[in-house]
Amino acid sequence: MQEDEAQQGAPTMSGKRPQVSEDHEGEPAFEWLVVAAVALGALCALFGYMMAATAVLAATAIITGSLRLALRERSPWKVRSVAFDSIIGIGLGLGLIITYASIRLLY
């Protein structure tokens, strides 16, 4: 009984309905494009093309973070807040590039 109420968004003890994150998520088509880019990066890595894999993943992260920052609430990529999504996306992309470059400089 309680599971059914929770799934239907029944009021909690405070009388308020819990926020359902799916109401505020991004566009499924764009999310599938991101999945395709990550799969492409994984395939590149699997076949030994580490530079290409890093570039694909870094570009995907930077693009999604930049889109979230530029388009704000209209962005097709939404996970959390605008600041969180932008910092994590752009930071991940730059971090991947810097890490790859630093490893290449060692050898």
Image (spheres, grey):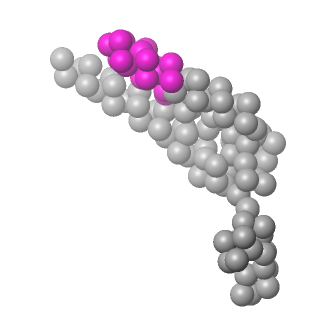
> In the rendered view, would you say 31 is above or below 78?
above
Q: Is residue 88 left or right of residue 1?
A: left
Which residue is at 47% across, 38% downward? 92
Task: Locate residue 67, reporting x and y percent.
Answer: 69, 35
> In the rendered view, would you say 103 is above or below 24?
above
Which residue is at 66% across, 34% downward? 31
- The answer, for residue 59, to whether it is visible in the render is no
Task: Locate residue 78, reporting x and y percent.
Answer: 69, 46
Task: Locate residue 10, reporting x and y percent.
Answer: 78, 75
Task: Locate residue 29, reporting x and y percent.
Answer: 73, 30
User: Magenta residues: mostly which secondary structure?
Assistant: helix
Q: Which residues are magenta?
A: 39-58
Front one among 87 and 24: 24
- The answer, for residue 12, to whether it is visible in the render is yes
Front one among 71 and 9: 9
- For the C terminus, the image quarter is top left
Figure quadrant of residue 13: bottom right
> In the rendered view, would you say 34 is above or below 11?
above
